[in-house]
Amino acid sequence: MAKKKKPVAKKKAIKRPVKKLVKKKAAKRPVKKVAKKAVKKAVKFEGTVVGKVTHYFPHVMAAVVKLKAPLNVGDRIKIKGHTTDLAQAVTSMQMDRSPISVGKKGQEIGLQVSSRVRQHDIVLKV
């Protein structure tokens, strides 16, 4: 005779309450709004300001300078900037691809330089 199998009792799943994680919010500190004022530092230069570099051509080692004062061939100049500190004599100046000997106030001239200069560098006459 075949034995009858007893029915197997299924185990009931016990539902347990899930603990909710509560994140603590950090206390907000009051933020003080401080108006930043633009502070211009007084920069002292050795000599008189002649102009400002507006462009640099690396292949021909030339800089375009917007003049604020007259400049002659043979004058000693110093070019000062954030990473630039260069002193040299003016050997070659051009305006509209033609050589000139005197640059007047307000003109943009091409100036041959001995090393790299950058835009916004200041040109000083020493």
Image (spheres, rainbow, N blue to C red):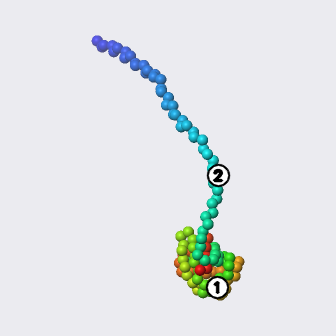
Mark yes or no: residue 120 visible.
yes
Mark yes or no: residue 107 visible.
no
Q: Quadrant of residue 122?
A: bottom right
Q: Could you say where residue 6 lies in the image, as x and y percent from the top left?
A: 35, 14
Q: Could you say where residue 60 lies in the image, as x and y percent from the top left?
A: 56, 81
Q: Would you place residue 40 above or below residue 30 in this image?
A: below
User: Tag 2 or tag 1, which sits nearer the N-term?
Assistant: 2
Q: Nearer the viewer, residue 62 or 37?
A: 37
Q: Residues within 10 Å of mark 2 (few under 14, many from 20)?
A: few
Give the quarter of the figure containing the N terminus. Answer: top left
Q: Residue at x 40, y 19 (%)?
A: 11
Under mark 1, the amino acid is Asn
The kind of secondary structure element at disc 2 is: loop
Q: Nearer the viewer, residue 95 or 68?
A: 68
Q: Would you place residue 113 above or below residue 34 in this image?
A: below
Q: Residue at x 33, y 13 (%)?
A: 4
Q: Quadrant of residue 38?
A: bottom right
Q: Could you say where residue 34 lies in the image, as x and y percent from the top left?
A: 63, 50
Q: What residue is shown with label 2?
A: 35
Q: Would you place residue 54 above or below residue 38 in this image?
A: below
Give the quarter of the figure containing the C terminus. Answer: bottom right
Q: Residue at x 33, y 15 (%)?
A: 5
The kind of secondary structure element at disc 1 is: strand
Residue 98: numbered disc: none
Marks 1 and 2 sit apart, C-alpha to C-alpha, by 46 Å
Q: Would you place residue 72 above or below residue 41 in this image?
A: below
Q: Residue at x 58, y 86 (%)?
A: 91
Under mark 2, the amino acid is Ala
Q: Are marks 1 and 2 in contact (CB under 8 Å)?
A: no
Q: Nearer the viewer, residue 47 or 82?
A: 47
Q: What residue is shown with label 1?
A: 72
Q: Nearer the viewer, residue 71 or 2?
A: 71
